[in-house]
Amino acid sequence: MTDIRVAVLVASDSGAAGDRADRSGKLIEELVAAEGWIASEKVITPDDRAVIAAQLRSWADDGDVALIVTTGGTGVGPRDVTPEATLDVVDRLVPGMAEQMRAQTFDKTPMAMTSRQVVGIRGQTLIVNLPGSPKAVQECLDILMPVLPHVLEVLTQPRTDEHPTQQT
């Protein structure tokens, strides 16, 4: 699937205030560009549930992006509210994707069990939460990239006769 349009949301109080450089959002843009996809939108928001939810809703409802990738706000800190904001806007969850990100990254760090990222669907848009560190972004997208084109195709063209199988 080509011409996949992606929006990137960076949830960071310090990033939104201009006190911290955005490394994770830039990495997401680079990784999706390497797939030939278009990173068409990016915002840095504070860790504010209503602000994050409003931006996710706006992008998904506008219909211009097939995939929204968030980074940051998935931990256990009191300001980590990205999963809650995502849950506020999605129609359906895709729990296996979030479960695999945690399971496979746990092999690299036990801190993966503290990540609360979710993956869900609003309309025809897939919303994926990633942790805030560039290392975690890379590891999680490495896990998801093999299935994302199929998921996005099914969302935008719901009739498929066959499901792809994993090549061994």
Image (spheres, rainbow, N blue to C red):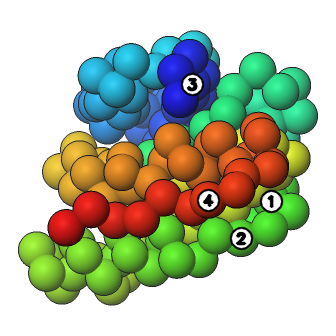
Q: Who comes first in sequence, dot 4 or dot 1?
A: 1
Up-down: is 78 above or below 142? below
Choose mark 4 or mark 1, whichever is in front. 4
Residue 76, visible in the rendered structure: no
Q: Are marks 3 and 2 in contact (CB under 8 Å)?
A: no
Q: In which quadrant of the rendered image does the C terminus lie?
A: bottom left
Residue identified by numbered label 4? 162
Q: Which of 166 and 113 is in front in this view?
A: 166
Q: Are marks 1 and 2 in contact (CB under 8 Å)?
A: yes
Mark 3 to mark 2 CA distance (whole Å): 21 Å
Q: Which amino acid does label 1 sit on?
A: Val
Among the 4 quarters of the image, the one containing residue 5: top right
Report the disc number at residue 93: 2
Mark 3 to mark 1 CA distance (whole Å): 20 Å
Q: What residue type is labelled 4?
A: Glu
Mark 4 to mark 3 CA distance (whole Å): 21 Å
Residue identified by numbered label 3? 4
Residue identified by numbered label 1? 90
Q: Is mark 1 on a helix, strand or loop?
A: loop
Q: Which amino acid does label 2 sit on?
A: Leu
Mark 1 to mark 2 CA distance (whole Å): 7 Å
Q: Who comes first in sequence, dot 4 or dot 3?
A: 3
| Residue density around tag 4, few if under 14, some if 14–19, many if 20 or more, within 10 Å | few
